[in-house]
Image (cartoon, grey):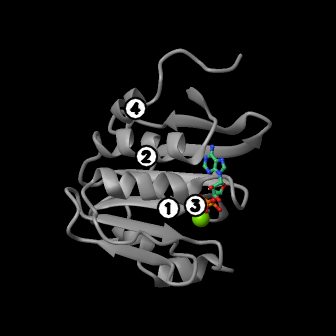
């Protein structure tokens, strides 16, 4: 597990850029944390890092934004507005995530059973110093993505 204190949005976006540099076809990056905790900010930095040049908006209402022009085709999802797992299944998430490009999924923890076992899990929390971002890789495919985080834990 890696843990980082991010003092400002620029640091969170830059972390997204460092993850982007290591991203691969089939990658699954699951983002959880409260509203305003920085999930979209991170995703925007990640999209930029993959070479997306246009606007990267929160997919709160469209649910999935696709960036086929990215170095690895990027799918950015936000499941906040989905009420039931069947809706997520109807979006094709179960079949596509882990195969079809690289996926970054906000509020993925609302549907914990849908995702491949090997993934990168990031948890965002408000803190007096800014945001605390914790990263766990659950398998060998995604373990190299942890190198995007500073090795020394920023907090005890
Ligand atoms: N360290 C930080 N990292 C990310 N966002 C921050 C940070 N400090 C302040 N912010 C602000 O918090 C908000 C995060 O919003 P957003 O990324 O949309 O959150 P989420 O997608 O988790 O709801 C933005 O307004 C951003 O400017
Ligand atoms: Mg968001």
Instruction: Say whether disc 4 or disc 3 marks the residue closer to the N-terminus.
Output: 3
Mark 1 vs mark 2, foreground winner is: 2
* Residue 98 occupies quadrant: bottom left
The residue that label 2 is drawn on is: 16
Q: Are marks 1 and 3 in contact (CB under 8 Å)?
A: yes
Q: Secondary structure at mark 4?
A: helix
Q: Secondary structure at mark 3?
A: helix
Identify which residue is drawn at 61% across, 38% down: 133
Does residue 116 appear in the picture of this structure?
no
Residue situated in front as seen by the camera: 90 or 33: 33
Residue count near mark 4 (Cα–Cα under 10 Å), binned few <14, some 14–19, many ≥20 = some
The disc label shown at residue 105, or none: 1
Which residue bears the numbered disc 4? 148
Q: Earlier in the sequence, mark 1 or mark 2?
A: 2
Label 1 to label 3, Cα distance in Å? 6 Å
Nearest the eye: 117 or 135:
135
Is label 4 or label 1 in front? 4
Q: Mark number for residue 21?
A: none
Q: CA distance from mark 2 to mark 3?
A: 17 Å
Query: Which mark is nearer the camera, 4 or 3?
Result: 4
From the image, tell me which residue sits under label 3: 108
Question: Where residue 26 appears, x then y in whole percent?
Answer: 29, 54
């Amino acid at each position: 597990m890696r843990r980082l204190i991010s003092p400002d949005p620029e640091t969170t976006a830059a972390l997204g850029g460092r993850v982007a540099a290591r991203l691969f076809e089939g990658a699954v990056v699951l983002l959880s944390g409260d509203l305003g905790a920085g999930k979209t900010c991170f995703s925007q930095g990640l999209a930029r890092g993959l070479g997306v040049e246009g606007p990267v908006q929160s997919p709160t209402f469209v649910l999935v934004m696709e960036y086929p022009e990215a170095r690895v085709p990027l799918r950015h999802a936000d499941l906040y507005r989905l009420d039931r797992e069947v809706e997520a299944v109807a979006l094709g998430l179960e079949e596509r995530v882990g195969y079809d490009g690289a996926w970054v999924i906000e509020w993925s923890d609302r549907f914990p059973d849908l995702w491949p076992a090997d993934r990168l899990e990031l948890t965002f929390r408000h803190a007096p110093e800014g945001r605390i971002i914790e990263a766990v890789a659950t398998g060998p495919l995604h373990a190299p993505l942890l190198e995007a985080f500073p090795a020394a834990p920023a907090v005890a």
